[in-house]
Image (spheres, grey):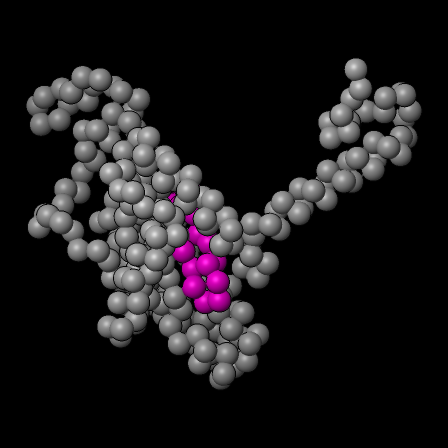
Amino acid sequence: MQTPLCSLTECPFGAEDCPLCAEVQRLQGECERLRELSHTDALTGLFNRRYLMAALDQEKERTRRTGLPTSLIMIDLDHFKRINDTYGHQAGDEALKWATHLWRKSLRRIDILCRYGGEEFAVILPGTRLNAAVRAAKRLQAAMEKAPMALLGRVVPLTASFGVDTYVHTEELTSRAFIKRTDQYLLEAKIKGRNQVCCRKPEKSKQSMEVTVDERSVLYGGLILPVKGKARKK
């Protein structure tokens, strides 16, 4: 049986310095590099729009299986054109990288930060309800306000506008439609004066801040957990 080239690690003829193995390993490394480039933004090192769409499809499927919601934050840097016009396009690139640096430190490891295009970004928050997603967006907003960018010896304050929405398992909604709906709240934030967080209004006047019984069952693998003096079985 012949050894596939894609899994060839040793010379089939026992040669110590096999040019065939060396070439296969080089091609494998090149394929891996191209796969990385296909879903990574070259400037910021974040995931790109292509990866965002694939990841959002995956998280929505997880929501349908588990019942745990998926939240999305759409972000737009405020007055970005003004930075380019005043300081040059290189300064604009630095602003994008600075925002990326700040936001990465403010998110969980499971959150997926992407560059959507231009000065617009997106964050997928798996297993996150609306109120928690809004708090996350406000952390990103505060991070920018507390750490202005230093540019050419000057302090350049950066702000951003945020739109937040949540997908639940009962919805029939494509990923593109979910992004478009969230983008409407981003537009609302910009219309209202920028540097703020806007989101869908909750259906109930009060939202529980606790994890629900069903969510506990999914998160803890069906264990019986006490809730207000009672136990819920699997």
Q: Quadrant of the N terminus?
A: top right
Residue 40 lies, with reference to residue 212, above or below; the image says: below
Q: Is residue 225 above or below residue 188?
A: above
Report if residue 86 lies within the magenta region: no
Q: Position of residue 213 (x, y in %)?
A: 18, 29
Q: Quadrant of residue 43?
A: bottom right
What residue sits 48% from the left and 58% below the top?
115
- Taking depth in this image into account, of 76 and 16 the one nearest to the observer is 76
Residue 46 visible in the snapshot = no
Residue at 48% from the left image edge and 67% from the top image edge:
118
Q: On the rendered structure, is 2 left or right of 146?
A: right
Q: In the image, which residues are magenta?
A: 108-122
Per the image, is 116 magenta? yes
Q: Position of residue 208 (x, y in %)?
A: 14, 42
For residue 31, which quarter of the picture? top right
Q: Residue at x 24, y 31 (%)?
A: 215
| Residue 78 lies in quadrant | bottom left
